[in-house]
Amino acid sequence: MLTGYRYLLAFTPEQNAYAEKVGAACRSVWNTALEQRRAYRKRGAWINYVEQARQMAEAKTEFPWLAEVPSHTLQQTLRDLDKACRTHGTWKVRWRSKARTDPSFRFPDPSHIAVERLNRRWGQVKLPKFGWVHFRRTRAVGGTIRNTTVVRDGGRWYISFCIEDGVVAVEPNGKPPVGVDRGVAVAVATSDGDMFDRVSIRPGEAKRLRRLQQRLARQRKGSNRRRRTREQIGILNARIRHRRSDFAAQTANRLTRDHGLVAVEDLRIKNMTASAQGTVEQPGRNVRQKAGLNRAILVKGWGAFLSALQHKARYNGSVIVKINPAYTSQTCHACKHVARESRESQAVFRCVACGHQANADVNAARSILAAGLAVTGRGDLAVGQSVKRQPPELVPA
Ligand SMILES: [Zn+2]
């Protein structure tokens, strides 16, 4: 199975300067090639990867800064652009602006890459034209490297390897199923009553972020001070993002390791961003909480969590079942009565029909589990019954 590993690079000052150069060249190639593709489209014509790669090879004789960059890396940029244009359409592909895009470049040919372990904490990787680069070896690079990406994120350079790890298919783990709801107060609540949460932004950081953003708003466009403020915001955001993705990966690992089936809501990002109010048929959830910036953060976090779940499920022999989210927060898990009024507050669910009371997120997670089991034809497994005797017989996704 394909998986990705990411490590912090420790460039020498020369390597760092060269990386900036390569990143800038790739950005420039991307933008120029995109402009060219758009010009062709305007005339009703196409230009493909082969022709663009040929023209770039020519341009290298004219522009020394282009010739300094590894050829495969430049070609890969054109290939990535080609793929993006085919997938999203030439007009929807975005420019890589200097201010908004972190520089990144790829080495598509694994035969040009070598990885060595130096000691317990450090490894080194040989990259074309860079030579040996040290990296923080936080875990072993196991498996066969397929391709390699170098990216600057929050002011630091990272290397990520796409790796074929040789794991074929994992047997279903036969563990009991679980329903998972994304809460507002807690990040993740399960039908077992477990809560998973972690602070992703500390109060001091929130304060500092606010101050930096205010400062940014005052600063003159294109000024050096503004660029520095933007960099600081980027570094802070990256730290928060890493913390959140660590949390997603760890929670996803635990859930899929301990459960043979994980039922979650199928929340298409579009659905969620369109309207927090929802429609009459599908009333929105957590309407007030979803408003504004908070909503955007939640959407992002949940999307990342879902992909982490899918990924870990393949390794842990679990399956992810996505269910329609309508009414899960308003359905009583005990008597199945649906009423908006039952959701007494953000935290408390009290059924207006039978009086069943529970943590609102846990109640929702139980409804999600019931729906997930119904979807997979295991609806007979009511929650609370001894599900351990009847593990879901499902093939991992
Ligand atoms: Zn009830």
Image: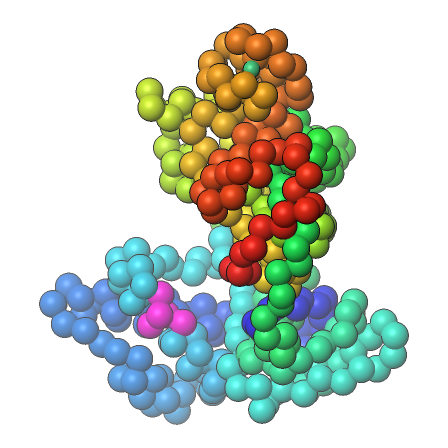
Can you name the residue that lies furthest to the right here?
120
Q: Kindly give the residue lying farthest to the left in the view shown.
A: 44
Residue 293 in the image: state x and y as whole percent: 52, 31
**Residue 210, how many percent across, how many down?**
64, 32
What residue is at 88 percent from the left and 74 percent from the top? 120
Span colored in magenta: 80-84
Quadrant of picture, ligand 1? top right
Q: Position of residue 382 (x, y in %)?
A: 58, 34
Report the residue at 53% width, 72% height from top.
105
Going 57% across and 39% down the picture, which residue do you hit? 381
Give how far across and how far down residue 154 sits, in percent.
64, 55
For residue 298, above or below residue 90: above
Q: Nearer the viewer, residue 170 or 376?
A: 376
Q: Quadrant of residue 396?
A: bottom right
* Residue toward you, 368 or 226: 368
Question: Height in image: 192 above or below 262?
Answer: above
Q: Quadrant of residue 360?
A: top right
